[in-house]
């Protein structure tokens, strides 16, 4: 597939639809990773080629809100994407977590705020769901995103995680409530820095109380929770940041106790590592490196 040809075809198609609407446009000119043209006096429209062969349209510089939404809708229709208008709004905040299913290491929630052109640029450089990339690449991508984009990160090391989890459990709440509190805090920190079109979170619960916690930090901003949200660049970026922070936290704990702490939830290697920690530092040390409410703790103490 010829990426330049796809860009030119999409630009010509969009300019034709603008002309049908009575909006003239300039001839497209090359920019890094794409093309751009002026939509009358309203502003600049940019198109970027992605690695998977698709094309991203950035209308964030179009000043007329109605025309901007119309252009974004045309782009989504051409790409076969969701027609839900709110998911075409920019800037977007994406939020995701890491460490939820890992016995050792922190629980990390990250939020990333992106304009559409920034999302296109990150996608072109390989930003995608961190579960699909090796650890070293996730760490590199996470560091790059934190350097270049507005981010907010909430980290609960195991000792604080265990304390907060126990407090929630005593009130009949669970891990989803803790996740929602962390997501809400990270989202709120970014939402306070300027206008936000939509917040997107990978769905981890359908309970109404979870939605209340997620929206607490961004009143008036639509919050969309969807399964597989890591397919959206803002959420994928957040997943990379969260994964990078989790891996760094796990490595730091390993160094502190002198035992290599594996990823995962309940493998034999994890049980052996937990027993090694106890042998070196005593029973109470487990709560400093592990999420002790996991069933794995029972397996550790059986030995």
Image (cartoon, rainbow, N blue to C red):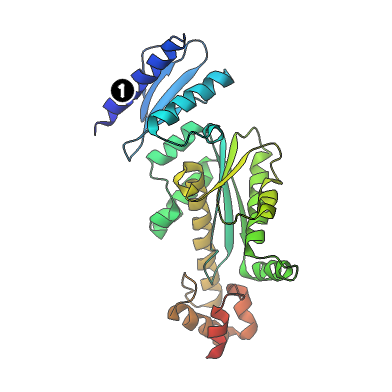
**Looking at the picture, how far across and down is residue 270, in whole percent?**
47, 78
Name the image quarter holding the N terminus: top left
Q: Residues within 10 Å of mark 1 (few under 14, many from 20)?
A: few
- Which residue is label 1 attached to? 9
Return the residue nearer the eye: 104 or 131: 131
- Residue 280 placed where, x, y %? 56, 85
Residue situated furthest right in the rendering: 171
Q: Position of residue 144 (x, y in %)?
A: 47, 46
Residue under the point 45% across and 21% down: 45
Residue displayed at 75% across by 67% down: 171
Q: Residue at x 59, y 56 (%)?
A: 205
Q: Quadrant of residue 91?
A: top right
- From where the camera sits, is residue 25 visible? no
User: On the picture, is 281 further left or further right than 13?
Assistant: right
Residue 52: x and y in percent read 32, 40
* The quarter of the displayed image where residue 14 is located: top left
Residue 180 higher or lower than 197, as above or below: below
Q: Which quarter of the picture shows residue 109?
A: bottom right
Can residue 68 be seen in this snapshot? yes
Task: State whether residue 166 is above or below residue 179.
Answer: below
Q: Is residue 106 left or right of residue 219?
A: left
| Vertical comparison of 183 with 21: above or below | below
| 79 with respect to 188 (left or right) | left
Work out which residue is located at the far left of the displayed protein and give it.
Answer: 1
Question: Label 1's element?
Answer: helix
At a point 53% along the width and 24% down the height, the residue shown is 69
């Amino acid at each position: 597939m010829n990426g330049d040809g796809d860009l030119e075809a999409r630009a010509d198609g969009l300019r034709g639809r603008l002309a049908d609407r009575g909006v003239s446009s300039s001839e497209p000119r090359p920019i890094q990773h794409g093309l751009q043209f002026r939509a009358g006096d309203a502003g600049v429209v940019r198109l970027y080629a992605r690695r998977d062969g698709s094309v991203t349209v950035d209308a964030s510089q179009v000043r007329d809100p109605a025309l901007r939404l119309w252009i974004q809708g045309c782009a989504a229709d051409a790409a076969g994407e969701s027609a839900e208008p709110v998911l075409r709004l920019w800037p977007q905040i994406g939020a995701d977590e890491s460490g939820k299913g890992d016995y050792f290491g922190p629980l990390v929630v990250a939020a990333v705020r992106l304009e559409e052109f920034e999302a296109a640029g990150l996608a072109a450089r390989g930003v995608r769901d961190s579960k699909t990339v090796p650890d070293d690449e996730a760490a590199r991508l996470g560091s790059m995103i934190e350097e270049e984009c507005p981010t907010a990160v909430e980290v609960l090391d195991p000792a604080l995680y265990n304390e907060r989890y126990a407090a929630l459990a005593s009130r009949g709440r669970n891990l989803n409530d803790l996740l929602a509190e962390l997501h809400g805090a990270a989202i709120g920190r970014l939402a306070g820095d300027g206008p936000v079109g939509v917040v997107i979170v990978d769905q981890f619960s359908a309970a109404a109380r979870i939605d209340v916690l997620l929206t607490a930090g961004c009143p008036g901003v639509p919050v969309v929770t969807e399964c597989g949200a890591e397919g959206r660049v803002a959420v994928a970026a957040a997943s990379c940041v969260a994964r990078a922070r989790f891996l760094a936290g796990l490595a730091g704990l390993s160094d502190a106790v002198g035992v290599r702490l594996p990823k995962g939830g309940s493998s034999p290697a994890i049980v052996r590592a937990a027993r090694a920690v106890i042998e070196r530092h005593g029973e109470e040390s487990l709560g400093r490196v592990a999420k002790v409410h996991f069933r794995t703790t029972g397996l550790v103490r059986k030995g």
